[in-house]
Image (spheres, helix red, strand yellow):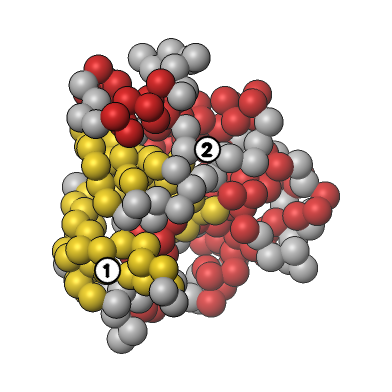
């Protein structure tokens, strides 16, 4: 579903990715792990066409990511960032339905889809007319997830979607996302710092350091057979919780 081939990206004099390769199979949930600055978020933004690669080729469902295809690429992608990334001047329902209205969905189509997704994400419909500032962090995140899912895209890119939440809300949303991912059978690329979240949600994990994938596989493979001192240190730093 997603391939990055020999991709390089720099910002000024800072090289973030160099000759980077990645393949994401269709219908799987893959977690990108790594320290801050390892290139995880840059990978997502390159796939979404927010940034364009300096070198190399990126494809989403066989469509090349370039300046000509940006609109088509973004129609294939649902993007969720920390705290939902909602427009503060729009209500929850206005945030959710923005692109559906742009694409000419009827009132009934929007209503039916909204009811389906509100039920799936356990968002009370009584909150839909509220502005983001009147919602809790978990509620804003649910609205952001519904917005990303609304047009039923093929690919979901999630950038630390639960990172700003309190532990109980985060745990609840992790369980809901696991159910959603299993039901959707879509391609999901999740960026997180958290080994335990990756173990819970992802089919496989790719661990990045300094813009390169240094180990990939199931979480148990990485935990039990780290291939470098860095991987071992990264795992041991989060050893306090179960990774099963």
- Residue at image location 33% in from the left, 70% down from the top: 9
For mark 1, what is the residue?
A: 8
Task: Determine which quarter of the picture holds residue 34.
Answer: top left
Residue at x-position 44% and y-position 17%: 239
Mark 1 residue crowding within 10 angstroms, few (<14) / some (14–19) / many (20+): many
Q: Which of marks 1 and 2 precedes in the sequence?
A: 1
Q: Is residue 101 left or right of residue 47?
A: right
Above or below residue 172? Residue 70 is: below
* Front residue of 15 and 199: 15
Residue 127 in view (yes/no): yes
Between tags 2 and 1, which lies in front? Answer: 1
Please, what secondary structure does the residue beneath circle 2 have?
A: helix
Residue carrying label 2? 120
Residue 77 location in percent, x, y? 38, 61
Mark 2 and mark 1: Cα distance apart in space: 38 Å
Q: Is residue 38 left or right of residue 169?
A: left
Q: Secondary structure at mark 1?
A: strand
Q: Quadrant of residue 71?
A: bottom left
């Amino acid at each position: 579903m997603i391939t990055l081939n020999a991709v390089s990206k720099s910002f000024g004099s800072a090289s973030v990715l160099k000759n980077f390769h990645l393949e994401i199979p269709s219908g799987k949930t893959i977690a990108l792990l790594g320290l801050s600055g390892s290139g995880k978020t840059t990978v997502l933004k390159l796939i979404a066409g927010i940034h364009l690669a300096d070198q190399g080729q990126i494809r989403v469902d066989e469509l090349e990511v370039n300046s000509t295809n940006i609109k088509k690429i973004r129609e294939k992608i649902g993007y969720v960032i920390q705290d939902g990334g909602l427009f503060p001047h729009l209500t929850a329902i206005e945030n959710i339905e923005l692109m559906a209205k742009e694409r000419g969905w009827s009132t009934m189509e929007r209503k039916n889809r909204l009811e389906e997704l509100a039920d799936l994400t356990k968002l009370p419909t009584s909150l839909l007319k509220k502005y983001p500032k009147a919602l809790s962090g978990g509620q804003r995140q649910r609205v952001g997830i519904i917005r990303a899912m609304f047009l039923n895209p093929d690919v979901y890119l999630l950038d630390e979607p639960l990172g700003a939440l309190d532990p109980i809300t985060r745990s609840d949303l992790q369980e809901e996302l696991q159910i959603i991912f299993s039901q959707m059978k879509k391609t999901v690329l999740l960026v997180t710092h958290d080994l335990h979240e990756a173990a819970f949600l992802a089919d496989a994990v790719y661990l990045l350091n300094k813009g390169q994938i240094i180990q990939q596989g199931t979480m148990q493979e990485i935990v039990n057979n780290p291939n470098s001192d860095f991987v071992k240190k990264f795992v041991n730093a989060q050893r306090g919780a179960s990774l099963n």
